[in-house]
């Protein structure tokens, strides 16, 4: 990402280049599928580092933004200033972006502050409707990265894969936060019954 950011900064109009490249891709008919036929993607997802030229390019090329957040004090304090900073930057670049999701990441239920931080987000008027299901600490994410595979390919039955699926379904509107809370209660009851 550092190399990509340096490249973006070195180019004339660099931050707009990703958007232009996507437009050209769509005009050309999309991406080749396994059969070699061009297909238009329904979604294009950018996974970027925070606060770099490459990230600015991705945000400028996007319509919606999902923000992972760790349940740590400075992360919680920084979420509002980060959203304000992105909004201000996009205003300067004459681009609107919708903050669609706040995704709790690397959640550890054994930490005392976890529930308190979650309640705080759920009670915030600006954020409560965009809080997504959590991604808990799962070593399979690291293992999948080490093997250069997605969590779905490397460990399709893992907790991490299941939670990623919930996030995708939430984004697509086929899974709600109420569904998530119901599932958590059911899973907790099942775990207690097994003990």
Image (tube, rainbow, N blue to C red):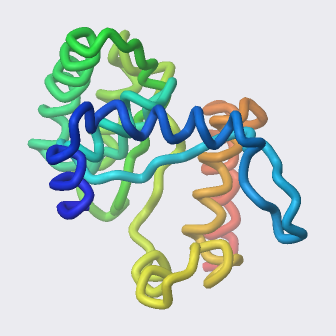
- Residue at x 69%, y 48% (from the top left corner): 183
Q: Nearer the viewer, residue 84 or 128?
A: 84
Viewed as shown, does residue 109 lie left or right of 175? left
**Residue 147 in the image: x percent, y percent?**
49, 90
- Residue 7 visible somewhere in the drawing: yes
In the image, is residue 89 above or below residue 31?
above
Q: Where in the figure is residue 153, as x and y percent of width and height? A: 67, 79
In the picture provided, is 106 more to the left or to the right than 64? left
Q: Is residue 52 visible?
A: no
Would residue 168 appear left or right of 139 to someone viewing this image? right
The quarter of the rendered structure image containing the C terminus is bottom right
Where residue 156 sits, quadrant-wise, is bottom right
Residue visible at 53% across and 44% down in the picture = 133
Q: Is residue 39 above or below residue 13?
A: below
Q: Is residue 125 above or below residue 73?
A: above
Judged from this view, the residue extending furthest toward the left is: 74
Name the image quarter holding the N terminus: bottom left
Q: Nearer the viewer, residue 158 or 14?
A: 14
Question: Which residue is painted at 26% across and 58% down in the image?
Answer: 4
């Amino acid at each position: 990402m550092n190399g990509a950011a340096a490249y973006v900064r070195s180019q004339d109009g660099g931050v707009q280049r990703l958007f232009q490249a996507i437009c050209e891709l769509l005009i050309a008919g999309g991406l080749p599928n396994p059969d070699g036929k061009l297909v238009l993607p329904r979604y294009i997802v950018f996974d970027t580092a925070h606060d770099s030229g490459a990230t600015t390019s991705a945000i400028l090329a996007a319509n919606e933004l999902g923000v992972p957040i760790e349940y740590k004090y400075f992360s919680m304090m920084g979420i509002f200033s980060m959203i304000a900073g992105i909004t201000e930057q996009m205003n300067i670049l004459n681009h609107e972006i919708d903050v669609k999701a706040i995704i709790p990441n690397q959640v550890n239920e054994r930490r005392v502050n976890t529930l308190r931080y979650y309640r705080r987000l759920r009670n915030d008027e600006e954020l409560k409707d965009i809080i997504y299901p959590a991604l808990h600490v799962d070593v399979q994410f690291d293992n999948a990265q080490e093997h250069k595979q997605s969590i779905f390919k490397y460990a399709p039955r893992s907790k991490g894969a299941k939670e990623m699926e919930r996030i995708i379904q939430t984004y697509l509107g086929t899974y709600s936060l109420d569904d998530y809370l119901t599932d958590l209660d059911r899973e907790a009851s099942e775990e207690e019954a097994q003990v």
